[in-house]
Amino acid sequence: MEKKDNMRLYKLRGYRKVLTAGFKLYTENFRRLFKASWIMALGYAVVCGCTGTLAAIKIPALTVALVQQVTAFQGIFVKPFLEYGVNLIMLIVLSLLSVITLAFASATMLAKLKEHQAEGNISIPSRWFAVSPKLMWRTLKGVLFTGIIITVPYILMLSALTFLAVTQPEALHARLITVSITMLVISVIVAVLALPLSYVLMKYIMEAPCSYWHTMKNSYGTGLRYWGTLFLVFFVSTLMVTITGLVVMMPAHILNIANQTAHLGLLMGDPLGMPDHIIPLTFVTFTLCCFIQFYVSQVTLVHNYYVYGAIEEKAKDISSAQRLNSENESES
């Protein structure tokens, strides 16, 4: 009974206890979480495998072909240029599809966390695919809306920089250091203000149905108030996942670097030197690495789940104290 109480969601916790509780819940229930999510995780990994293969094999090959063509003929033929553009569009589409499948795969984990939220435990899944389409759609909307909020400032900043580069290139070159520092400061401010969105996203998914924007309006201030806790949990959890992820993704990175180096050697007259089976090898490697990396990265999801519960409990205690003070003042 005491163990179950220690693992419940809504409990006052500092960032250390949030990290400990999240890691413990994840490791102790990993087999159950894996059984509930492996199909969607495999789908995500396959999409990432296609994306990684295209980025590591096709794009460098087309880039080298275009550079060689420009060097030899002082111009770009329409056919290879269009092929390059089509492959870039395919890469963008696959990247977006990766985000969508990642949201769907995370929804299978969130379904078990919602069960833990309601019942205090995670049961053995009765079937391989038990997540509701409604939760998957809600998770996708939350991820996309959060991503839009974060990326819009950067898009506006890059658009302004592009406009200056086209209209006033001399002035931009003369004040390059000032512009770089300004961009850095703006990026840091956006990152600082974006951190409470992790709390907003989890609250939107875990609580009663309401619009994302309504949840953000009512909850962003609470997340900003507990920015320090969010930052400490995010920093430690992300650092742990990043270090582990570098090891997990190392085979994929090695293949990518080897392929980039081989195609760079073509520009210097060297043979390609890559085996005939490099495409299926790259696809299988990226797929397996991304499948494992998905489960490594889900630790941050569980940590975000517990920090959401801790903030909710703190906010409830503050609200109760304020209400009690108000009642005392009214009586006196």
Image: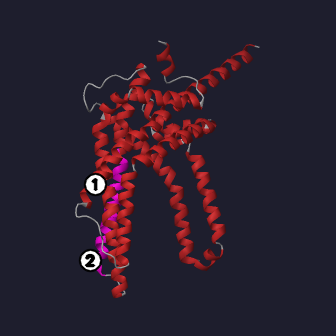
Tell me: residue 139, above or below residue 22. Answer: below
Is 97 one of the magenta-colored residues?
yes
Residue at the far left in the pictured view: 276
Image spot of residue 238 (x, y percent): 51, 43
Q: Which mark is residue 261?
A: none
* Residue 66 located left or right of residue 148: left
> Is residue 144 in view from this perspective?
no
Question: Disc 1 to disc 2, how far (Cα)?
Answer: 26 Å
Give the main secondary structure of the magenta stretch: helix
* Residue 25 located left or right of residue 84: right
Is 196 one of the magenta-colored residues?
no
Task: Name the residue that disc number 1 marks.
Answer: 283
Amino acid type indicated by mark 1: Phe
Q: Which mark is residue 79?
A: 2
Q: On the image, which quarter does residue 65 sit in?
A: bottom left
Tell me: residue 257, above or below residue 166. Answer: above
Q: Quadrant of the C terminus?
A: top right
Residue contact at pointers 1 and 2, CB within 8 angstroms: no
Circle 1 crowding by C-alpha within 10 Å: few under 14, some 14–19, many from 20: many
Nearer mark to the viewer, of 1 and 2:
1
Amino acid type indicated by mark 2: Lys
Image spot of residue 46 (x, y percent): 28, 49
Image spot of residue 119 (x, y percent): 41, 19
Task: Magenta stretch: give its range.
Answer: 77-101
